[in-house]
Amino acid sequence: MDIRQVEEFMKCVAESETKTFPFKGKLKVGLDLGTAYIVLVVLDEENNPVACEKQAASVLRDGVVVDYSGALDIVRRLKEKLEKRIGQELVNCAIAMPAGTESSTKTHCYLAEGAGFEVSAILDEPSSANAVYKIQDGVIVDIGGGTTGLAILKDGKVVQVEDEPTGGTHLSLVLAGNYHVTFEEAEAIKQDYSRHKEILPVLKAVVEKIATIINRYVKGKDIDTIYLCGGTCCLTGIEKIIEKETGIRTVKPENPFLVTPAGIAMNC
Ligand code: ATP
């Protein structure tokens, strides 16, 4: 897909969060258990977005479940909400693990199964996003809540995946310190698009640090484009800072938040 097609697809995924209608036919589900959000994306067999639900949560840390029953409650609730909206039971789901957390795969499976899913595919997180981007060569950078994941692609194959512990949570901590507010208040400020211009200078140093991490893995490799995804990439202007720091063309769809969960669903 070129970036405009990705843009169009992601717009439909975001819109599917508010659509409610009964759906008949086979469905594909992607479950993204994140540090900051738990997301379920539902697609039809042709990968058209059907519905989506998400909830902010602090039940995982660095890809590892730290509150199993809390996570289970949330996944069950999101599944029930979706089933009510769509009018059918959701049976199968695909899940994805951040690079380096493969030893926690079983826990993620038990969680999905405990919520009533059958796990049909287990993927790695940054390369799930390439189900949406479908790039041959380049790097996908998924900047989430707790971590930044990278997948380097050569001739359409993922040749390297990395995960580094810096993400949106660190941006919120910096905002909380700067504005003398709680973490929750800082989150709200950060997610308010009308304040992005005001907060970007405060957050620049952390974004530059993320760019340094990206540089560490792409330097010396023949990479001409950085494809961004993950909730933190919603920050207006983040792509410009990363492009300036790395010297590599950097692109993102208007709605980067749901790229990975949608990519997980595509593999269900
Ligand atoms: P991880 O991948 O580290 O496990 P996650 O999967 O929960 O985390 P995402 O759901 O991709 O991560 O992104 C969550 C992050 O995106 C949070 O830090 C959140 O504050 C941030 N975020 C969400 N919306 C916006 C917005 N509009 N502007 C800036 N940041 C945002």
Image: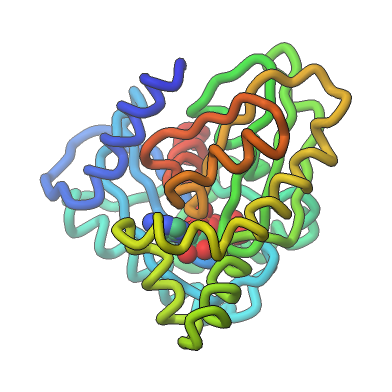
Question: Where does the image place residue 118, in percent across and percent down from the top left?
Answer: 50, 51
Total of numbered circles in the picture? 0
| Residue at the spot 24% in from the left edge and 44% down from the top edge | 16
Determine which quarter of the picture holds residue 154: top right
Which quadrant of the view contains residue 171?
A: bottom right
Asked if residue 141 is positioned above or below residue 100 in the image, the reply reads above
Q: Residue furthest left?
A: 21
Toward the viewer: 172 or 259?
172
Work out which residue is located at the far right of the displayed protein and give it: 220
Q: Which residue is drawn at 33% across and 70% down?
A: 77
Residue at (46% x, 63% y) in the render? 199
Q: Where is residue 242 in the image (x, y as percent from the top left)?
A: 63, 40
Image coordinates for residue 244, horizontal then vertical, percent: 65, 35
Q: Which colour scheme is used?
A: rainbow
Give the residue furthest to the top. Answer: 155
Side of 20 relative to 44 (left or right): left
Determine if residue 263 is in view: yes
Relative vertical location of residue 40 with respect to residue 256 in this rendering, above or below: below
Q: Residue 71, image x and y in percent?
A: 51, 74
Q: Kindly tell me whether residue 118 is visible in this rendering.
A: no
Question: What residue appears at the point 59 percent right and 76 percent down from the top-left corner?
Answer: 173
Does residue 245 lie above or below 206 as drawn? above
Viewer-nearest residue: 75 or 25? 75
Q: On the rendered structure, is 58 left or right of 43?
A: right
